Image (tube, coloured by chain):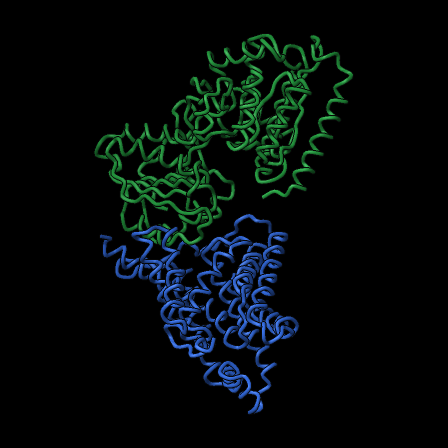
Chain colours: A green, B blue
Amino acid sequence: MRSPLRRTRWATALGVTTILALGACSGDDGGESGKDDPILVGISLPLTGDFSEPGKGVQQGYEAWAKITNDKGGLLGRQIQLKILDDQSNADRVVADYEQLIGSDKADLVVGPFSTRLVVPAARVAEEYGMLFVEPAGAAKEVFSQGFKNLFYAAPAVANDHYNLLAEHILALPADKRPKTAAYAAMDDPFAQGTAYGLKDKMEAAGIKTVVNEVYPPNTTDFGSIAAKIATSKADMLVGGSQYQDGVNLIVALQQLNYQPKLAAFSGAPTNPEFAKAIGNKTEGVLSPTGYSVDAPYESNKEFVEKYKAQFGAAPDEDQANAYTTGQVVAAAVTAAGCAEQGDCQKKLVDWVHANKVETVVGPLNWDQTGKPQGAHMIQQWIGGEIKIVLPEPVKEADFVYPKPAW
Amino acid sequence: MPSAALLLQSVILGLLLGGLYALLAAGLTLYFGIMRVVMIAHSAFLILAAYLAWWSHSRFGIDPLLSMIVTVPLFFGAGVLLQRALLSRLRAITLTMMSVLLTFAVALIIEGLLGYAFTGTQRRIQLGYGSASFGLFGARIAVVKLIAFGLAVVALAALYLLMKKTTFGWALRATIQHRDAARLVGIDTEKVAGYGFGLGLATAAIGGTALSLDTTIYPSLHWHWIGPLMAIIVVGGLGSVPGAAAAAVLLGLIQSLLQIPLGTTWAQTIFYLALFATLAFRPQGFFGGRLAQRF
């Protein structure tokens, strides 16, 4: 429970911020932006609190987008100016932030924060003001069941669709080669379970029998028993709805039991830079869906990776890429509609995004009526000590290896 | 009905896990036996030892087992110090209750310092032999789990010999059985209690190293361990080292087998069900432990 004192302090802080913000705005002539004024993009991000780690990643993605776009002359000849507020990973705070950004700061555009828990309340504010709301990180189904009309998720797929390309590939195998039994182990977490169960539903519908279906609490450290169940079931394929450490622990426990599936896929873990070392380099054939790869040959991706490295001195990650993608979607809409301001323009932007496909660093994106992206994640596989894109065909770096070599 | 292979594998995993539980519970029951102290911080020291093993391995590339050369004497010293400087100052009449508060604070301090020094990120020692195993009647035994089990067996055997065969062990057991009588026959019970406490913490150093071989560690992990360990020493009969060991192996085995039908989440409840049953039907514990009858 939050104490009344803290609540008062919040209110004071908010009040002071609002007054300062109003003061800062008082020099303006009331919001009618001229042709050469910068485009003000309002963002609230969890820079402190639970989501501070990914929140900072998203911030870098937005900053990279603003810099790269401005270096090329901006949008509609106007420079982009970001206004980023810290919502402290707090859902009440994020609402106040977007109210402020739209109401008093007169932001011309707003884009989303990080994670479902903050995206939903933020999207509600944007919806009230009729603003276009593209967001980089709200992938759970709750986001798309609220009836939002202005929301778009700027990533290839929601959690349940991550494995779609893998599912298609498995089902396209000749019947005698196809796996017949499958084992699933997922962390008790909506995202991790969503990925594994999305694939499970498709496999079961195609007649691939589920022989193990385990759910474990997020802090599980001993995977011996789960691994024993999977190993003795001798399932042909193994699917892990994992984040990072749990995936590593499960793989090590399975290797200890000398379990050798024909196919092993884990969400989260295998794309982590530490992964190979963590499981003693026994990575051969491990699969993982990924929303973003620095190696993906999409046209804008090369430019993004190169300029991002120059700006931040390291390669971008999925959080950065999704924020950058958000910027790309907004920029495409603004360029096509020829406007960037509050009011009628926003409706034009929303209609354009609904009707069009946008080329981004994560591939071409389009959306259904609820703002759910219609793509699927790329599938990567560990081959010869490196992780490579194997699906979809047009962007693959290596051929899909099946059955999986022993690990 | 689970297959025979799965049952055998689960029995093996259960016994290996039970061995580790036995070592970890041994220290805990020792504190209670010697001083009537409920040592909430025992598992925090355990995680601390695991972190030291991880740190020395990732920083200097030292095999985690070698870290015990430093951690065991260090923890023994810390135990003596903790007992002499803090716990012996508590008033005898409220000792058991106040020791809960005091050691709770110690646990929080250790957890906080670990978080400060190593952040909350989950850590795991990356060993060359981490996933090595060998077959036994169709089941697999992981080398790291066997090493952990071996450590537990050796440490428990050493503890047993120490308690049964040495003068210090006799003094320690006399102190556990009847403090006043022990003092009457000339045993310096204060000193013995201090060393006994050090001995308990030394088992935590060994247990933590064993734990670090095959599991992820994070600063708040000790809360995950203290509940089952407390349950084990109550079921085993407070203050009885062989009782704790027997209860630990049995409960580890049951937990492992229950995971087949119930899954990971519900299998953990066995500890609390066993605790409840013990308190309801046989408060002195199922494996010896005359001591608890007096409380």
Is residue B127 placed above or below B77 in the rendered structure?
A: above
Q: Nearer the viewer, residue B278 or A339?
A: B278
| Residue occupying the point 68% across, 42% down | A5
Q: Nearer the viewer, residue B48 or A2?
A: A2
Q: Position of residue A90 (x, y in %)?
A: 59, 35
Q: How many marks?
A: 0
Q: Which residue is outermost to the front?
A: A4
Is residue A17 placed above or below A184 in the rendered structure?
A: above
Q: Position of residue A259 (x, y in %)?
A: 32, 49
Q: Quadrant of residue A199?
A: top left
Q: Nearer the viewer, residue A252 or B27?
A: B27
| Residue occupying the point 27% across, 47% down | A234
Q: Nearer the viewer, residue A311 or B30?
A: B30
Q: Is residue A177 left or right of residue B219?
A: left
| Residue occupying the point 63% across, 10% down | A76
Q: Which residue is outermost to the bottom?
A: B185
- Asked if one can make out residue A347 in the rendered structure from this viewpoint, the answer is yes
